[in-house]
Image: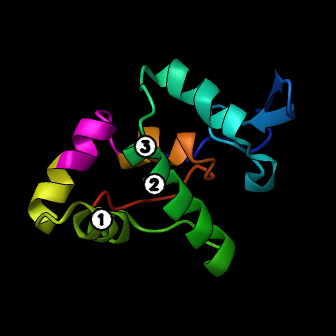
Amino acid sequence: MRTLPDTLTPLDLASGTVMLDAGNFIVDPDTWTKEFAEHMAEVEGVTLTSLHWQLINYMRASLEEHGIMVDARWVIKHLAKIEGITKSEAHKLLYVLFPYGYVKQACRIAGMRQPRAWSTG
């Protein structure tokens, strides 16, 4: 269930203030910074590696190009391509990188809005 948009919390970072909804998702993806990603990764207990950053950068580029967040299946396909593995292996690897899932962790860290409904691929 999507949280109410009027329940907002400011997150003050050195790079600026970011507004979060009740689910800790960014309200305005344009306010996302790498500092925000590092902060949210720490909150989520995720240590960002170069592979995490490749996925985050892919997600951000897709958002910028298409105006909507990328579906998990495209992230899995991208991960399979860059790692030279099958989509099934990439799906498992995505959950190694983001143990609580694509929406809960990857989208949150990459600065995507909370989706209304979502397929996790």
Q: Of the numbered discs in the image, which one, if any, rests on residue 26?
A: none
| Amino acid of disc 3 | Ser
Find residue 47 and report its image quarter.
top left
Marks 1 and 2, how far apart in space?
A: 9 Å
Mark 2 element type: helix
| In contact (CB < 8 Å): disc 1 and disc 3 | no
Marks 2 and 3, how far apart in space?
A: 6 Å
- What's the magenta region? 93-101
Position in image of residue 62 (x %, y %): 56, 71
| Amino acid of disc 1 | Ile
Residue 69 shown left or right of residue 89 in the figure: right
Queried whether the magenta region covers residue 36, the answer comes back as no
Position in image of residue 102 (x %, y %): 37, 48
| Amino acid of disc 2 | Gln
Q: Which residue is mark 2?
A: 54
Q: Which residue is mark 1?
A: 82
Q: Which residue is mark 3?
A: 50
Residue placed at 79% from the left, 32% from the top?
8
Quadrant where the C terminus sits is bottom left
